[in-house]
Amino acid sequence: MISKLLNKIKYLFFNVFLSYIYNMNLTVTGYGPNQSKDKLTKQTYCHEKTGNNEVVVDVTHCGICYSDIHLIDNDWGISQYPFIPGHEIVGTISSIGRSVKGLKIGQRVGIGWFSKLCGKCTYCKSDRDNMCSTPEMTAVGRNGGFANHVIVDQSVVFPIPAKLKSEHAAPLMCAGWTVHGAYRGYKIKPKSRVAVLGIGGLGHLGIQYGKALDFHITAITSSKNKFNEAKKFGAKQVITYKDLKDYKNSFDFILVTAHADLDWTSLADTLDVDGNICFVGVPPSPISIHAFSLIMKRIKISGNPGGSRKMMKEMLKIAANKGIKPIIEKFSFKDVNKAIDKVKSNKIRYRAVLTNE
């Protein structure tokens, strides 16, 4: 017993020693496009030694978010090629910079949309760091998690609770953060009447977190085939888009997770006074809605880009304690193009996860 303990201590000290030595340049291998709409091919780059506040994570799992598709295809006009996508990352810390605190080698952690936050702006200093004035994104202008390693600032690295499997934790780093952040960002209270529009990769987690936060959840879907699953996720009732006319003044908050063009005026009519339509999914066309529907009931149209670091930690804790987990399909990293094609064609049930294990 003592011998095993000593060996473990030696192992940890050896790794800590290695991490503090002037880190050798790190060779990273991953998959990414060379130009817009390309298939992903193997990419290799050399990262200089770890910065004082940086952490190297050996990636074991990385979810595929539709934002990755948008970046691969340069739909937002911000992609810089070649690059490695991926921002739903889970792995193990293999190296830390000299100034890193609260994290250790061998620790299982997650990384989301951000690779660094400034920590100095008004938003970072007021627990709204997801609104940081000068953030660095995990796969915008740098390389992300479809790789064997990723290097990020310590400020955006989150320990994964022991109860969560890595394959389930990965999609939570963006999808879970997105829906939970919307609920918390707009301070939705227990017992509120919340509708989740769209039962897909985001929506099925929106239902689960809504149930965990004690909301009265109604799921809105285009397909009756998802009625039973939505109820298993925690919806009190499930309706179709065609049923909206029968639900006037029925909701306090609507979380729009669907990437579709809909009749937004009809949707607004289902809100009660001071209701809020919050977009976390991005419809392909501009949102058109009759102003009269907004004026008479003081209805708000809003959006939300995830949550703060504090909310991220809470989101992971809730998932661990309440048994929240995404429904996933796993792919090896070498099958990344197969996975992306399934995501693009809407054939994934409900989240795709790449694994290095």
Image: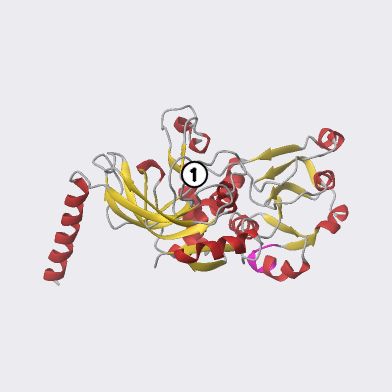
Image x and y of residue 197, in percent: 72, 54
Give the residue pinned by disc 1: 81
Q: Is residue 296 left or right of residue 34?
A: right
Residue 117 among those drawn in magenta: no
- Residue 164 seen: no
Q: Is residue 351 left or right of residue 45?
A: right
**Relative to the observer, which residue lies in front, 295 or 153?**
153
Q: Which residues are magenta?
A: 231-235
Mark 1 Cα-neighbour bin, 10 Å: few <14, some 14–19, many ≥20: some
Image point (30%, 46%), residue name: 102
Image point (51%, 38%), residue name: 130
Q: Amino acid at mark 1?
A: Tyr
Q: Is residue 164 left or right of residue 220?
A: left
Is residue 334 positioned above or below 255 on the image? Answer: below
Q: Is residue 101 left or right of residue 346?
A: left
Image point (74%, 51%), residue name: 260
**Relative to the observer, which residue lies in front, 144 or 60?**
144
Q: Main secondary structure of the magenta part?
A: helix
Image point (12%, 69%), residue name: 2
Is residue 353 positioned above or below 255 on the image? Answer: below
Which quarter of the picture shows residue 146?
bottom left
Q: How many marks?
A: 1
